Amino acid sequence: MSWGEDDGETAHMNGKPAAQVVEEPCVVTKSTDVEALGERGSGFRKQTDIQDFYKIRDECLAEGKLWEDPEFEAVDSSIFFSRSPPRPFEWKRPMEIVDNPRLFVEGATRFDVQQGELGDCWLLAAVANLTLQPTLFHQVVPDDQSFVDKYAGIFHFRFWQYGRWVDVVVDDRLPTCYGKLVYLHSSQSNEFWSALLEKAYAKLHGSYEALKGGSTCEAMEDFTGGVSEMYDLEKPPSNLFQILLKAFERNSLMGCSIEPDPSVTEMQTAEGLVKGHAYSITRVQYVDINTPNTQGKIPLLRLRNPWGNEAEWTGAWSDKSPEWRFIPESEKQEIGLVFEEDGEFWMSYRD
């Protein structure tokens, strides 16, 4: 297992397993700390005027129209840059997909991140982790927007680029096929913050296809303004678990993956893990255990597969594995233990 990156299309550093932790987030303190997309130094070459979210929204509300983004149009080239779509995609606004669209349904959680047909698990692992830190989350996903109050078909998201926060605006037209979202979506059919965030990140990079394959470390830096650390697991520090535990306690974002098989994309191991696929680390914990053969504390990790389905670890400490019988009920409640086919699972750090 390697701790940190990637996707089936992503290579490890020097072909070796690596560990990544992102720390020291840079928090926006005032509105002037954020550059609008297209401003000098924002890293985006504008084709039209600087896209100021509040100005555009107010103009659309005054004119009674829904905004259409001239910088990232609802066309095939916004999806693919190297080829045509494999089948016809139709761009639809959430109100055309469901009856009651919402940006959030009962808040944002890691289970709102369900991977679609795009190989951007490296990004989605970071998105899922972002939901664990409310301050960081609402820095990236501002809470001054909705499908109810002042809705004008425009939303905005903030990413750390070139040493500054950049505000990226998008309209809410999303790629669909047969009435369903093609890419990132929530487990709640009427929740759209995650799909719109992915669209904003795709706009920042030029297209959805540009997100195929990447580093979770890069995405976490873009979400935090923090600095990443990488560890080679072929030569790990002896106190790596303590490093991970301390990072978790400091609200750092973390991810992991298995080194990919160059001959097979996303091959599943005998114990349910997927090679070359990014996972979020959602908890780091010492757990008390008391058996005839083992007493004391064992180091466990809780991981989440952005597929959000039954593709989970099936070895020791997996869902419903016998090891959990030796953990006190109070401990299970404290760590929020649940067994569902939701992509999240526990495993021993030693595995």
Image (cartoon, rainbow, N blue to C red):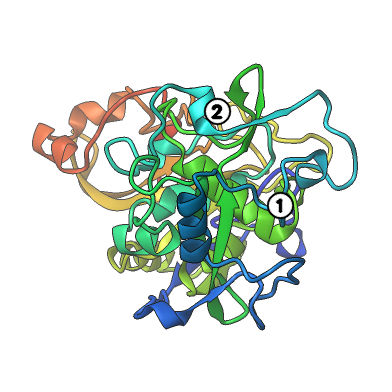
| Cα distance in 3D space between marks 1 and 2 | 38 Å
- Answer few, some or many: residues within 10 Å of disc 2's Cα (few below 14, many 20 plus, some between 14 and 19): some
* Residue with the mark numbered 1: 72
Which amino acid type is shown beneath numbered disc 1?
A: Phe
Which amino acid type is shown beneath numbered disc 2?
A: Gly
Q: Is residue 319 left or right of residue 207?
A: left
- Secondary element at tag 1: loop
Say above or below: 314 vs 227: above
Frontmost residue, 202 versus 245:
202
Confirm whether residue 19 shows in the render: no
Measuring from the top left, give residue 196's x and y in whole percent. Answer: 53, 45
* Residue with the mark numbered 2: 272
Q: Is residue 229 left or right of residue 143?
A: right
Q: Residue at x 71, y 54 (%)?
A: 70
- Secondary element at tag 2: loop
Frontmost residue, 272 versus 119:
119
Measuring from the top left, give residue 133's x and y in whole percent. Answer: 33, 58
Instruction: Identify the disc placed on residue 326.
Output: none
